[in-house]
Amino acid sequence: MMNREEWESRDMTALAELQRKGEVSPRELVETAIARIEVLNPVVNAVIFKAYDAALAELAARPDKPAWLGTPYLIKDLHAPARGLPLTNGSRLFRDMPAPAIDSNLVARLRTAGFVFLGRTNSPELGLNASTEPFAYGPTRNPWNTGHIAGGSSGGSGAAVASGMLPAAHATDSGGSIRIPASCNGLVGLKPTRGLNPFGPHRGDANFGISHEHAVSRSVRDTAALLDITAGPDVGAPYFSAPPEGGFVAAIARPPRRLKVAYWPRTWWGDEIDPECASAVTDAARTLESLGHDVEESQPDFEAKAMIDHMMTVLMTTLGPMLNMVEQQIGRKIGPDDLEPQSLAVLERARATSLDTFLITLMRMQLEVRRMAAFFETFDILVTSTMAMPPPPLGYLPTDHGDVDAFLEKLFDVAPFAAPFNASGQPAINLPLAWSKSGLPIGVQFVGRYGQDAELLQLAAQIEEAAPWFDKRPNLAA
């Protein structure tokens, strides 16, 4: 078994290379990850379901030797079916449901490549929060300061990777749920272009193209390597974004062309953000300028608050039919013993939204997307803070009340920058480029043109070389 320094000093790609060279066995990789989870999870509460025996048995039974054999991985407890892993969506409502009998296509591609699934990571109920504090499993704590949030909704995955359990983990994103935890935990977090990664066969569409899946990791090359495994359409996909010829890892070996970059160190509506977050944006802009890119301060011309309101209405309304089907399945009405007060209030709002209202809202969201997208006819890249403040304390975004409007207002006071690019489907990545005076990570968001994930990753790799972060790790008591 590898010791802590041997384990944490390598990213996923480097660990897989040791395995391919025969310097470690696939089982040793898995057993080291298991040991790290057992030590660290009591501190951060990132993993809510463990499947160690099944994972080791599956590894031992494999007749083939794929390139990533034995790479340990955790799957988020939201959206992604994985054979044998219970899927509860962070909720008491689903805790007694049988585990899925199938893999999603993304999970299946990872499994085929040799990844070994050790369990599920914590998620806020139904993914409805930017902090991971579900009633069902309790709060996930930030490894950099356990009194603070780890972000949401992929907070369990973020804390698992940042704490040193393993080098990368599955994540999903419907309004910033990859980028916000990446920012909170000091990680790389890419939301790919709509349709680049598959989301079937259990879903025909991922919330009208708003929802995405990928990962959080400690290096740009791991993020690129995972895309090389998972990217490409599945059967019946309503959207399609083509991977680059030769793949993403090959792409990031080349520097990006000279790019026209805009940066914006305030909110979309012009308010000041936390000074340390604003400084991280302006420092990133200076770094890009030093790398030879053309940089200026500018922002898209669109009604950001309206777009976010429209998008959240679309997301919340789609929960209604899904939970109606659950009621039919369990043969009773959903009540306060099933869902948190905030989730129940969202369900009530969803059921009260008419079809006309829903379709008009969707149309208005798409019109704002058109306005925002025009900005990227002039600029290749937009740089913002990922969050408007460093990770706040646990309890800052409570779900024990039913005031949906007040909750959303506070949530987007914390993290207003990510959601527009779920609506537009553009690629957007968090890079861990700053830390607060109190030692908490501060992420910077880089947004690319639709379908230009390779170019965005090329830029991310260039920044990683100029301003490396890999050796910055939290010092947990464990």
Image (cartoon, rainbow, N blue to C red):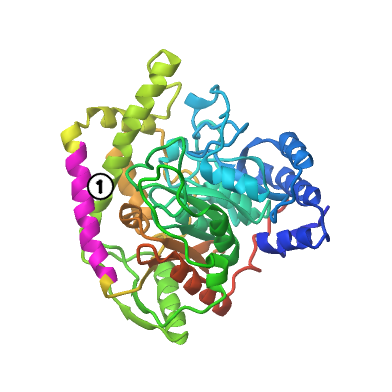
Depth check: 280 or 24 in front? 24
Where residue 110 appears, as percent x and y from the top left, is 60, 48
The vertical placement of 33 against 9, above or below, is above
Determine which quarter of the picture holds residue 193.
Answer: bottom left
Q: Position of residue 101 (x, y in %)?
A: 58, 29
Crowding around mark 1 (Cα neighbors within 10 Å: few <14, some 14 to 19, many 20+) is some
Q: Position of residue 338 (x, y in %)?
A: 45, 23
Residue under numbered circle 1: 309
Task: Confirm whether the magenta stretch covers residue 365.
Answer: yes
Read off the magenta span. Answer: 358-376
Residue 172: in magenta span: no
What residue sits 57% from the left and 75% below the top? 253
Residue 143 lies left or right of residue 360; in this view the side is right
Q: Can I make out residue 197 in this image? A: yes
Along the horizontal axis of the image, is 191 left or right of 461? left
- Is residue 141 visible in this depiction of the protein? no
What amino acid is at disc 1? Asp
